Image (cartoon, coloured by chain):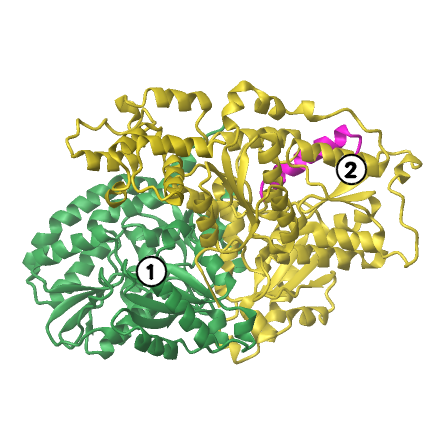
Amino acid sequence: MPDAFFLVVGSRTCAHLIQSAAGVMIFAEPRFGTAILGERDLAGLADANEELDRVVADLLQRRPEIRTLFLVGSCPSEVIKLDLGKAAERLNQQHRGRVQVVNYSGSGIETTFTQGEDQALTALVPLMPESPTPQLLLVGTLADGVEERFLTLFERLGIGPVASLPPRRSTELPAVGPGTKLLLTQPFLGQTARALQAKGAELISSPYPLGVEGSELWFRAAARAFGIADEHTSAVLEPLVTRGRAALEPHRKALEGKRLFLLPDSQMELALGRFLQRECGMELVEVGTPYLDRSLQQQELDLLPADVQLSEGQNVEEQLERVRQSHPDLVVCGMGLANPLEAEGITTKWSIELVFSPIHGCDQAGDLAELFARPLRRRGALTFA
Amino acid sequence: MELTLWTYEGPPHVGAMRIAASMQGVHYVLHAPQGDTYADLLFTMIERRDQRPPVTYTTFQARDLGGDTAELVKRSIRDAADRFQPQALLVGESCTAELIQDQPGALAQGMNLPMPVVTLELPAYSKKENWGAAETLYQLIRTLLKPQLPPSGLTKPDPKRWQEQGRRPRVNLLGPSLLGFRCRDDVREVRVLLDELGIDTHVVAPLGASPEDLRRIPQAEANICLYPEIADSSCRWLERQFGMPTVSTVPIGIGATEAFCAELQELLGLEPTTKGSGHSRMPWYSRSVDSTYLTGKRVFIFADATHAIAAARIASRELGFEVVGLGSYSREQARAVRAAADELGLTALISDNYLEVEAAMAEAAPELVLGTQMERHSAKRLGIPCAVISSPLHVQDVPARYAPQMGWEGANVIFDSWVHPLMMGLEEHLIGMFRHDFEFVDGHMSHKGEKPPGPQEADPITLAAEATGVDEAELLRWAPSGQAELSRIPFFVRGKVKRNTESYAQERGIVSITDEVLYEAKAHFSR
């Protein structure tokens, strides 16, 4: 949503995190900012609400193209109980007709960064118009190219109309109602799903569209929900599946039999583990996830081996001890851990790349496998002898 | 409340992490939520560190807030003490924990831990990273040296005492830390420099030091305050309590390195040596005819105070540049930056708002920017060459090669890295001479560039507008003869000529800018 802006109301730490965390400071600049709380705001010398109004007015004057403003709560704004819901209401009054203001909590007191997407989308639900018209609603961000591709495929399957949350333009929010069937593109959107279900939408349960198998099951689940005949669905999907498997093959050779340890980071770990185990032949040492929402992940759980070692939550020292003991061939982890593990001789893959890369769908399965095969290939290719 | 997109400095607890991660045998328990663990990657990614910073986060969650977060703090402290068995433990809190007021330091002090515990109180809503780093180093030194405090009234130790003790004089290097600019290489270079002067390097801290090393600080004759942002408060305390003199000249640039050597020799009672600058190629490179084109190049400087002040001195005296803007985000050192700017007839820009810095940069119309990562981005946007001279830095500013800023070799490195982004003098002439060749069409100086544009057929105004970067409305003030002359001026100085001519015309109420006006303006400005 290029016309949306995310204003974090927090501390210097928040601003520092945004600019350092993903190393994306140049790209994040047009969409992110921080209203940094100062001593005066905390001591009550300045009315934090008045200050926020001033900062927002400033921002909107400088950036007239903003149509939707997300006020993002932070750890400190939550602890001092700054009511951003009220602030959003007030700002909506002040800037009516120009910009819509919503709020959500991006607090790092809770679990993990992918929950931010869930919270932001949840904040948009109350603004969606209501309509009983039957439709398929894709929920979750996708790379533009992948989204286009999915729309084409749904059309071939005979499913339509198809809408997306988030939409490309923040002002063109899709409708929701009893005719809406929800298909999640990411496994971490539990709150958004529940908010949409509360508006009458029906959730299509499925594994997530990662890998050939996951993508096929995902499209099949949608087709069944729309009463499309199995033969037709198969006729559309089979060529994709065959091609996807062929694209996987060279990477499968690199990954097969290799031992994989997924450290908890993005909540995509179950789907990735399932893909890498079933389609790429990897052996799962441990699948960690920061938070396990069984209502959204049951189908993924069912596809994992019965004896898989799952861990929920983060205790980095203990997890690292298990990594060192089991000495896996590949560890999927956050950026803070990658170089230290590499220095210990353990090959790693950063999980953040999986959130930013186009990896969804049968056509991307080869690319997804390649992301994991590359570190192994690289390690094999380097020699300093 | 202050709106910001980028910040020059992180919060003060990140400064404390820099000290902890720079040292050996120190561990930092940080009362902070999960979200604050991002700071690990500053070290593992930007510095490519092969180990995690020695930090244990308590990672309290919302559900802990109603209950007993103090118990969580104590558990984290105990676990960290058992697991890592550090020689000294730092205990502090981040911005959010500061609001809950669990006082983790007091909790730790009451736990009878086997190692010294240093409580860090770093106000997150008023102070920043460098202050946090300086305060952490100071508190560590103070805590560890408390048992050695000399009784008051004792005479100051004589910095020339080494002469009677039959050994070489020794000094400490204070200030180098992780995420500082080229500290690793500066330490190596300064060690060599000191060795050549007959001086031993005693303790280097915080980089690579253990708590045991900090306890040895008073054995040296003097402290060298290499980076005042980090070490100033520690040096002043050591001066007050232990009577240790501080060497405050920062040896960046030829002149400063000479002054640094002279200050040390005088203080320690060493024979002054002949000029050591023969060790550096920089003075000759700067004097050589090829460098003539550097004369009067307009530079804009914005950095931490240490590097901004040094850069201003090198640029103006040793490279013959014209400094057209000087500033720093280091408010604690603002006075020194202001003094350096005064000397150059400038007003220092003291700001931590990078947009304000970008505006000042655009206004100054420099030909070279020396700055931080932020200025690199701003300069890129404005199409001005830039060299990074200070933190905050990015992974590319931590080079694999030996690239100090200090000492004789540092001066060589500075010459190369500042001159490299500029177009060479002869190249400027050649491009001027051959600029009608398709290879040198505006904006393309590279042989790798896209294919040359075909013959153009457009009306002269549009053509001139495209060629000169003057928009059509503005062109009305530029007579055809003026436009023609402007388009003959090499594109890399054209902006400046255009601006100068327009302001010249405006001041004199000239409505139509002819070729004559352009040359009159040129003569006016070349006085």
Give the image location of residue A56, x and y in percent: 38, 68
Query: Is residue B75 shown to the viewer in this render?
Result: yes
What's the colour of chain A in the image?
A: green
Q: Quadrant of residue A55?
A: bottom left
Does residue B80 appear left or right of residue A190 in this picture?
right
Does residue B170 appear left or right of residue B105 in this picture?
right
Give, as a three-letter code, the residue at label 2. Answer: Glu
Q: Residue furthest front?
A: B509
Chain shown in yellow? B
Give the image location of residue B105, x and y in percent: 67, 68
Instruction: Look at the picture and state if A16 lies above or below B516.
Output: below
Mark 2 closeness class: few <14, some 14–19, many ≥20 residues within 10 Å? some
| SS type, badge 2 | helix
Give the residue drawn at x 55%, y 60%.
B11
Give the residue drawn at x 33%, y 40%.
A254
Name the chain letter of the residue that bears numbered label 1: A
Query: Is residue A319 shown to the viewer in this render?
Result: no
Q: Which mark is residue A154?
A: none
Does residue B280 appear left or right of residue B10 in this picture?
right
Name the chain letter of the residue that bears numbered label 2: B
User: Chief secondary structure of the magenta span?
Assistant: helix
Q: Quadrant of the N terminus of chain A?
A: bottom left
Closer to us: B265 or B107: B265
Closer to us: A146 or B342: B342
Q: Which mark is residue B263?
A: 2
Chain part drawn in magenta: B181-200
| SS type, badge 1 | loop
Task: State yes or no: residue B184 in magenta.
Answer: yes
Give the image location of residue A158, x and y in percent: 7, 60
Instruction: Look at the picture and state if A58 lies above or below B242.
Output: below
Q: Are marks 2 and 1 on the same chain?
A: no
Q: Which mark is residue A63?
A: 1
